[in-house]
Amino acid sequence: MNQGQRCWNPYLETLTREELHRLQLQKFKRIFHWAYTHSRFHRRLYEKAGLTPADITSFEDIRRVPKVDKSMLRDIQGKAPFPYGDALCVPLEEVVEFRQTSGTTGQPVYQPDTWQDWEWWSECWAFVLWAQGYRPGDRVFIPFGYNVFVAFWAGHYAAEKIGCEVVPGGVLDTQARILKIREVRATAMMATPTYILGMAETARRKMDIDPTSLGISKITCAGEPG
């Protein structure tokens, strides 16, 4: 990887609009076919809408595809194959990671992932982190609980994929995290916006540390609106 290159994936990120649309349609048709043929939940949903894979030939056809919302996924959770229900599109033995949503708006939605899914997750985040200036040699501090909530897991793996050194600050309290950032000379971090602001306030008011002196040059925020 050339650290000076502008894009993480120069091929995909420099496609013309027409080339991008062709690729998007190709990928959508492939994933629609996979869901239709491998998931009883999706097949029922699409057949009810009068759709089969052969019907998806253009972007206009995509507008006819029914949406899946969280309530639909909650309704099938706990059924076979347990605990994900029949929306699962792979054999249960291929699932290697359990994650779930935060539960802010109701019962958490379970997220089963294969190793291919995690490769996709980290690749998507790598696009973002590279665009934000993350590079091999960055030391990335992640003050995240590392629990069943999916949150910054993908950011962790993406930073590693780029070539960064990741420092997980999961079990530390806020003041210990601030001290660890200073101790290891972290250059970047990821957290929710309010937690970043809270850390800065704690450093300034409770520890007499100027947050700007810690050496963090890149901050990736996610997980909260606005």
Image (cartoon, rainbow, N blue to C red):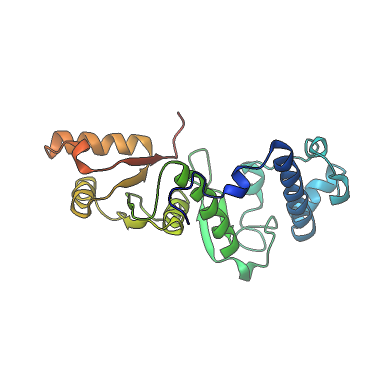
Residue that extends furthest to the bottom in the rendered view of this protein:
93
x, y (%) of residue 29? 78, 49
x, y (%) of residue 119? 55, 59
Q: Tell me the residue at 24%/43% (across/down).
A: 215
Residue 42 horizontal side relative to residue 138, left or right: right
Give the image quarter of residue 194. top left
Q: Tell me the residue at 54%/59% (across/down).
A: 118
In the image shown, does 200 or 147 lie closer to the viewer? 200
x, y (%) of residue 217? 30, 41
Give the image quarter of residue 62. top right
Q: Tell me the residue at 31%/38% (across/down).
A: 196
Residue 114 visible somewhere in the drawing:
no
Count the numbered circles shown.
0
In the image shown, does 190 or 94 lie closer to the viewer? 190
Residue that extends furthest to the left in the rendered view of this protein:
208
In the image shown, does 66 or 133 lie closer to the viewer? 133
Q: Is residue 99 above or below residue 193?
A: below
Residue 161 visible somewhere in the drawing:
yes
